[in-house]
Amino acid sequence: MKDVLNLMPAAILRRQLIRRRTVQWCAVLAVVLSTLWVANRFEVRKYRTLRQQLEAIAREGVPAQNMLREITTMRKQVNDLQYHEVVAHELEEQRQVLPVLGLVSQAARWSKGRLRVTDLRAGELQTVEAPTDGGKAHTGVTGVTLVGVALDSPTVAEFLEALVASRLFGDVKLIKSNEQKTGDFAMYDYEVHCDL
């Protein structure tokens, strides 16, 4: 049984009901939006913290990246220098041949056309052996063999004296000297070995 009688018109009752439901739903919606806003703020704060950590790690990694870049550049420079060193050693070994050729040419020129060098073997000048006992690399059997023709024996002797006087060779040896007669002329074949 009802103690209270509601004499209000139905339209007002409907409006009150709608207002009450609206307030209830607005309260629920406000709670949901507040919860979402708090969660969003938490995620934003977490994102900012992670971004700051990432920036700190990136700043810490910059010196390592620079060092890695420098190491790569230095390795390339070391490889280039090793290549240049190999080329320089080859040129240094080949350079020994040039003074020998100049000296032989000058000594033969002193004979005033009475002596001619027909063969010069200097292949051993460029033979390089590995370093021994931590020392420097040294050339193997270093020597020059000269073969040629002269008009007479004293010219060959003068040629040998010029080679000895140059002090480029440690030892100059006359290996052979043969007289070859062709018609009325006598020619002397000779072979000289010079050790550096």
Image: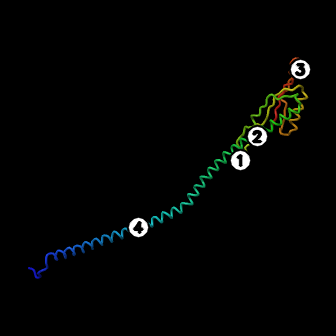
Circle 4 — which element?
A: helix
Depth-wise, is mark 4 or mark 3 nearer the camera? Answer: 4
> Which callout, 2 or 4, points at the residue further toward the start of the chain?
4
Q: From mark 2 to mark 4, how far is it between C-alphas?
A: 74 Å
Find residue 8 and report its horizontal and vertical position in percent.
14, 79
Q: Hey, which quadrant is residue 69 in on the image?
A: bottom right
Find residue 71 and report its horizontal and vertical position in percent.
60, 54
Q: Which residue is mark 2?
A: 95
Q: Which residue is mark 3?
A: 185
Find residue 52 and report its horizontal and vertical position in percent.
48, 66
Residue drawn where x is 55% and y is 60% of the image: 62
Q: What's under tag 1, amino acid-wise?
A: Gly
The single residue placed furthest to the bottom in the displayed view is: 3
Question: Observer-nearest residue: 181 or 74?
Answer: 74
Depth-wise, is mark 3 or mark 1 nearer the camera? Answer: 3
Relative to 172, does residue 75 appear above or below in the rendering? below
Question: Are the residues tagged 1 and 2 within 8 Å (C-beta)?
Answer: no
The single residue placed furthest to the right in the displayed view is: 154
Pointer 2: residues within 10 angstroms few (<14), some, or many (20+)? Answer: few
Residue drawn where x is 82% and y is 36% of the image: 102
Question: Observer-nearest residue: 150 or 109?
Answer: 109
Relative to 107, does residue 48 appear above or below in the rendering? below
Q: What's under tag 3, amino acid-wise?
A: Phe
> Which callout, 1 or 2, points at the residue further toward the start of the chain?
2
Q: Which residue is mark 4?
A: 44
Circle 1 — which element?
A: loop
Q: Identify the disc placed on residue 63.
A: none
